[in-house]
Amino acid sequence: MIRRILSLALCIPAIATAGPVIVDLPQLPATHDAYQPPTEDSIPRPGKAPEVTDAQIIEARDKAVAAMLRMQQPSGAWGSHKQTKGLNIAAPVPGAHYAFTCATTGLVVEGLCAAAPDTPEVNAALDKAEAYLLDRLPVLRRGRVETIYNIWGHAYGIKGLVALYHRAEGDEPKQQKIKEVIAGQIDLLKRYQTLKSGWGYYADHASQRPDADPTSFSTGTVLIALAYAQSIGVEVPDEMIQNGVRTILRSRIADGSYIYSLPHRMAPRITINRPGGSLARTPACNAALAIHQGADTIISKQEVIDWMDRLITREGWLALALKKPIPHESHFKTSGYFYYYGMYYAALNNHFLSEEKQEFYKNHLLDLLLKRQEPDGTWWDYPLYSYHKPYGTGYMLTVLALLAPDVVGR
């Protein structure tokens, strides 16, 4: 079951864009006892939403799409290992880079399918990217036994393939092929689900099933991707989902923050686990819980509103990490790569709210984000080889479509 926000009156087979795909979202309770926020006046509230025009959104979208068309690799993928800096995160070759490339390509594909205009150039780029994902995702594995970046490739690969599934409407053989590859990604995610229930990407010991400490956000990322797979009829083992949900619940603090990873339960009030450190994690974790708990979710509308308010009013605080080359070197141990990740899932969270609230947060978020577009049309937050511009822009194209589906993609 899915809900599609369409900016076109008709659904036309094999077009580049039909708006963002959103899984069915449950009706949230107004409040819930599981959420115990601090006093009302301790949560900053944004003022009147600034006006963002359709022309501004379309101009930003067009610049971003043009950048992605320029940056596509001959293989059909986006991003590569070729741009290094003085300090590079551990990325065993070639497996880690296959993971980064598949994840980046999945994000760009999702963004183009959601927001790009229906042009021959965009469709040609998506055809090449589709061929790449269908070829590379089935053979994607971890880089080394202790480095499990492939979970990002599987998760965002699924998101991209679900978008391509809808793009292929009317072509049943292609849709079946896409579903088969997605089913394979689910099997791999099951294999790489840690012995501690969720998903993480660094393991301490060599084992067939990783002993990695699961992180709240990577577990949320995977759970949301699995919901998208379910939305097109691909089966996901219930035990796999429930283990992931359990990990997020174990990571949750009553004020709506989520600890970084399970060992942080021993130090839940260090800075990265406080609201300032959880700004970009909470939207993903809340969405994952709400989607998979359904009508019994502990996530309330008031919690979503409070954390949207926090994200908007403290955006400048989170942005202090932007483009810094060392992970976790900013305040509250945040990293640059938190930024667009958080905005991407915040845009999804916006759909839990009333139309009036959606419009309010749409304008606030767009006002902040359009200003951060680079002169070359991209958005990026952390220098990661040459993956950062495509993945940041992929996130943002989907954000534009989620926030303004009646403007982009028409």
Image (spheres, grey):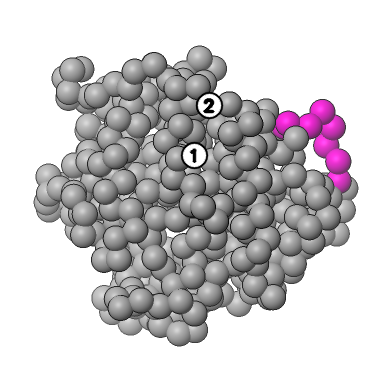
Q: Position of residue 350 (x, y in %)?
A: 48, 29
Q: Residues within 10 Å of mark 1 (few under 14, many from 20)?
A: some
- Specify the quadrant of the image occupied by residue 23: top right
Report the amino acid beneath label 1: Leu
Q: Which image quarter is the N terminus in?
A: top right
- Whether residue 189 is visible, yes or no, is no
Residue at x 63%, y 59% (from the top left corner): 68
Asked whether the beta carbons under mark 2 and mark 1 sit within 8 Å of each other, the answer is: yes
Image quadrant in which you'd find residue 146: bottom left
Q: Which mark is residue 221?
A: none
Picture quarter with the C terminus: top right
| Residue at left offset 33%, top offset 27% | 309
Q: Is residue 327 visible?
A: yes
User: Which region shows up in magenta?
Assistant: 6-13
Label 2: which secondary element: loop
Q: Nearer the viewer, residue 157 or 249?
A: 157
Task: Tell me which label, 2 or 1, sits earlier in the chain.
Answer: 2
- Spatial CA span between label 2 and label 1: 9 Å
Residue identified by numbered label 2: 52
User: Is residue 11 in the magenta section?
Assistant: yes
As drawn, is 154 to the left or to the right of 134?
Answer: left
Disc 1 designates what residue?
A: 370
Q: Regarding mark 1 in the picture, which secondary structure is present there?
A: helix
Taking the spot 63% from the left edge, 31% from the top edge, the residue there is 55
Q: Main secondary structure of the magenta part?
A: loop
Q: Residue at x 57, y 38 (%)?
A: 400
212 sits to left or right of 28: left
Return the x and y of residue 241 as percentages of the image width and height.
47, 50
Q: Amino acid at mark 2?
A: Val
Does residue 168 show up magenta in the picture? no
| Label 2 environment density (alpha carbons within 10 Å; few <14, some 14–19, many ≥20) | some
